[in-house]
Amino acid sequence: MDEISLVKKAAADKAVEFVKDGMVVGLGTGSTAEFAIKRLGERVSEGLKIKGVPSSVAIHKLAEEAGIDVISYEHFLKEKIEIDLDIDGADRVDPEFNLIKGGGGAHVREKVVANASKLFYVVVDETKMVGHLAGSFPIAVEVWRDHADEVMEKLGRYGDVHYHKKDGKVFISDNSNYILDVSLRVGEPITGLEVDLDSIPGVVDNGLFTLRKPDRVFVGYFDGRVETLERHQ
């Protein structure tokens, strides 16, 4: 395992220590969250009894392979199931616990799962911690396909806009939508931007997490430390 993977795994393992018997656990998407799912699978094999709610199709499959009892995303929505603890990753985290998510294109479901959770924990390596979100990483904006060009034009007021791509092809989300990546100009205000972006007709949701902030952030460092940061209410 390479160095960055070891750092991510350490942060994920620390967060998983807080999972208790009988919990419904939100299963985030991304490389660091995947380490959490694999560790949860190990704990399940040791006798831990939990149910998991996946935030993407890929994570549903990974969780099943890990031996976790999975509640489908669709069933979770239909039954309005409350989640005890959601463990997810992030592309960037600022000092106020504002997040950018969506590099993997699953931010809409990730946000739904986070909002349904009593506790929201985020696991990252130290490279994801930044002083300011603007200019640090593109904001993923999921849009209805028929409105993509119109939305792209309106998003241009915030910075450069491009279609999110994977393997050289335009990415299609699990919700069958396009995603536009907005590279915010350095210094672009973050306050209120999550709501502003969602107010554009044709936008489904965006990768800013400024309203539902994590309760704890677990940061893995290359020197082997894992720091637990707590959000002050």
Image (spheres, helix red, strand yellow):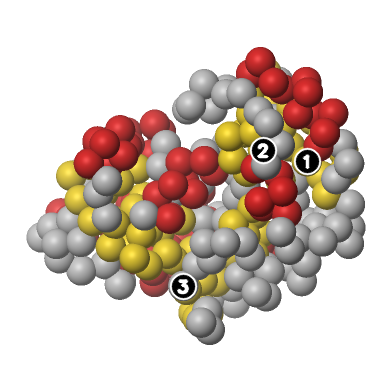
* Residue occupied by mark 2: 141
Separation of disc 3 and disc 1 at Cα? 27 Å
Which residue occupies 20% across, 51% down? 51
169 vs 11, left or right, is right
Which residue occupies 89% across, 41% down? 157
* Residue occupied by mark 3: 215
Asked whether 110 or 146 is in front, the reply is: 146
Where 36 falls versus 141 (above or below)?
Answer: below
Q: Where is residue 139 in the image (x, y as percent from the top left)?
A: 71, 45
Q: Position of residue 10 (x, y in %)?
A: 45, 67
Of helix, strand and loop, which one carries label 2? Answer: strand
Which residue occupies 42% across, 36% down? 56
Residues tagged 3 and 1 counted as in contact (Cβ below 8 A):
no
* Residue occupied by mark 1: 182
Separation of disc 3 and disc 2 at Cα? 24 Å
Q: Identify residue type, mark 3.
A: Asp
Residues tagged 1 and 2 counted as in contact (Cβ below 8 A):
yes
Q: Which of marks 3 and 1 is nearer the N terminus?
A: 1
133 vs 106, left or right, is right
Residue 54 appears in which quarter of the rendering? Answer: top left
Report the residue that reaches farthest toward the bottom: 232
Q: Identify residue type, mark 2.
A: Val
Separation of disc 1 and disc 2 at Cα? 7 Å
Q: Earlier in the sequence, mark 3 or mark 2?
A: 2
Which residue occupies 83% across, 49% down? 184
Q: Where is residue 136 in the image (x, y as percent from the top left)?
A: 78, 56
Q: Identify residue type, mark 1.
A: Val
